[in-house]
Image: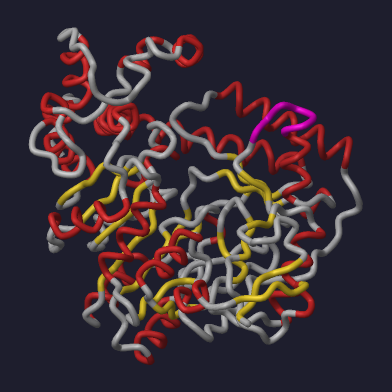
Amino acid sequence: MNRDLQARAPIMDALNEFLTMRVVPFDVPGHKRGKGNRELTDFLGARCLSLDVNSMKPLDNLGHPVSVIRDAEELAADAFGAGHAFFIVNGTTAAVQTMILFAVRRGDKIILPRNVHKSVINALILCGGVPVYVDTHVHDKLHIALGMRTEELKRVIAKNPDARAVLVNNPTYYGICSDLREIVRLAHENGMLALVDEAHGTHLYFGEDLPVCAMAAGADLAAVSMHKSGGSLTQSSFLLCGTGIDPEAVRQTINLTQTTSASYLLLSSLDISRKKLALEGVEIFRHVSEMASYARAEINRIGTYYAYSRELVDGVDICDFDATKLAVATAGTGLSGIEIYDLLRDEYDIQTEFGDTSNVLAYISVGDRRQEIERLVGALSEISRRFRRPAEELPAYPMPRAVVRASPQEAYYAGKVSLPVGDALGRICGEIVMSYPPGIPILAPGEEVTQETIDYIRFAKERGCSLGGTHDPTVANIQVLA
């Protein structure tokens, strides 16, 4: 990485230059630099509205960049150690879907873990690809999905040598990492592309003593959620390409779904945040890791929680752990993770990332300070004292094993009927059923409704998890193929 070059922010510089030009706008957006909507301008700020502009020659065009955006892409690629980097303004969902649309065509197989994000399934609906799942084990105490076992991946590859790609999460929401280098090696050895969902791994490119990132592991494509741990505006991300991928072919795939009205607020936030991480990322994420380590120690001192870290690494299901993640098991309090999540928000004005049946996740990143960590620890201690129930051993409800009976595309577009969940046993699901966050499907279109899935849906609802994705907002009924 060239640190001298990384001190530049071409999109920000072009916008600053544009503001001095006093251009009279006879283009979109219609608020005309905020003059057309005073309430909006007062709410968001005059500078924000003055920078909400359309593509034009001085500012380049995201769909076909030739100047400042192209320069910014090259700087991002240098910062991330990639062959090329694309600015994504449709969220990391668009980056994930581009990877799959680029690699997989109708009828093609893609190998992936069951705990993928819904964006993966939606991409398969669009392209007609067929998922082949590598079943992931679940931790018997923490009730979280673990990594992709390489021996299991070898078995799946041997049974599906015609698969076009392998996709892996790095890391998971909870910080779990698979053996990424070996997964990439196995994919390439068998003529498959290696795709990496790094929605929660931006910091891996800049921190020290963290798990390996996708580009360093030799992956072909990686979707990186810059707005999560990288500090850019919500909905802004990067799609990274390895050196063996044709970037212009990837750009054509991006342009199938990415907006032609790219927000320069999002673009500039990516540019500025890349600059900050390139120049200060080592120090930033050293501080983040120290705060997470301190928080874990203090939370574990309470005695009823378990904030876990690298002690989980076993070289099989967990090959590394992202120690910036503050995931906390709550079983010792007798409360579910979603109950802790709600109490933190409603009683203590603390918004954590999410809670599930057994864990709560607090996201620590570039913007956090020690005093907020102290407030979180204090609130967790009070919750344990005020609301604790006798600890109970939760029944083991692992993520149901997927039984694929049709491609997601076939099932999504097929005729469907709505049935009560309990009456859908043995039918083929026609929609996504998921808990959000983190957005991992319990059922995807084309999968058989098994007793496991019915039990899991009921269990998740009983524990207060937020289920969605279904035509019926209450998730009392699900749509199955007629």
Q: Is residue 274 above or below residue 451?
A: above
Residue at 34% in and 53% down: 95
Q: From this viewpoint, which residue is outermost toward the front?
A: 26
Q: Quadrant of residue 366?
A: top left
Nearest the camera: 179 or 351? 351
Membership of 189 in magenta stretch: no
Percent across and percent down for residue 183 are 33, 71
Percent across and percent down for residue 102 are 26, 65
The quadrant the C terminus occupies is bottom right
Regarding residue 213, the answer to whether it shows in the image is no
Give the residues in magenta. Answer: 345-351
Percent across and percent down for residue 129 are 37, 76
Horizontally, is 61 left or right of 367 in the view? left
Q: From this viewpoint, which residue is outermost toward the right?
A: 390
Q: Is residue 51 above or below residue 94?
A: above
Percent across and percent down for residue 136 are 53, 73
Q: Quadrant of residue 144?
A: bottom right
Nearest the camera: 421 or 159? 421
Q: Is residue 297 above or below residue 449?
A: above
The quadrant the N terminus occupies is top left
Regarding residue 381, the answer to whether it shows in the image is yes
Horizontally, is 398 left or right of 257 in the view? right
Q: Is residue 97 above or below residue 127?
A: above
Q: From this viewpoint, which residue is outermost toward the bottom?
A: 159
Residue at 77% in and 32% down: 346
Q: How many marks?
A: 0
Residue at 24% in and 58% down: 253
